Amino acid sequence: MNAKLVLALAMGLAAMAVASVIVHAFGLPSARIEIAAILVVWACLSLDTTRAAMCSYAAGYLFDVMGGAPTGLYAFVAMLTFVVCRVVVVVVDVRGPVGFAALCFFIDSIHQLIAHGLIAFFAGRTGPQPAHAALVALPATALFTALAAAAMHPLFQRLDRAFDREESSALLR
């Protein structure tokens, strides 16, 4: 793993901790801020395919661990979301925090639908059905994720610029 990927994941882990405190402080039990989806979008925009896939898996795994029950669901969902995002990024040109936030809104909606679909599929008729409140909270969660993406965009830009400068100076040597 390279340093850019490790720093992005560390930044994502810190953002997940802050996001969980914000959601708890505002008393929003169903809605959440999906930092993992933001990391997947950033990885698809900034990294090559292999590193973006590693970042997506690690972001999903961190989301599982931060959720308190590392079941592997969100690591798998992050990888599926990575595939969708990689296709979307080929078609859409994203520049600036507003475009990044809009893309995160869309990708997070897909991310949540995949997760709830998998939960419903594997729960079957005998297991517990996915919480209706979580599906009702989908727009709010996607909106909070988009707002967090807009706030994190300058940090991602700074990270990209720092490592782009480092790579270009290494090429000149």
Image (cartoon, helix red, strand yellow):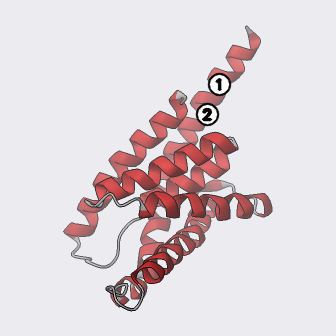
Q: Name the residue rendered at 41%, 43% in the picture.
A: 11
Q: Residue at x 36, y 58 (%)?
A: 64
In the rendered image, residue 10, in percent from the top left (x then y), is placed at: 40, 40
Residue 78, percent from left and from top: 52, 59
Residue located 58% across and 68% down the image = 107
| Residue 8 drawn above or below residue 148 | above
Say what amino acid the circle numbered 2 marks: Arg
Callout 1 crowding tier (Cα within 10 Å): few <14, some 14–19, many ≥20: few
Q: Quadrant of residue 2?
A: top right
Query: Which residue is drawn at the image coordinates 46% and 57% (left, top)?
Result: 75
Q: In the image, is residue 30 above or below residue 38?
A: below
Q: Which residue is mark 1?
A: 165
| Location of residue 100 with respect to 3 vertically, above or below | below
Q: Quadrant of the C terminus?
A: top right
Residue at disc 2, secondary structure = helix
Quarter of the view holding residue 91 = bottom right
Q: Which residue is mark 2?
A: 161
Q: Nearer the viewer, residue 5 or 121?
A: 121
Q: Position of residue 112 (x, y in %)?
A: 48, 74
Whether 159 is drawn above or below 63: the answer is above
User: Do the residues bearing badges 2 and 1 touch, measured as CB atoms within 8 Å?
Assistant: yes
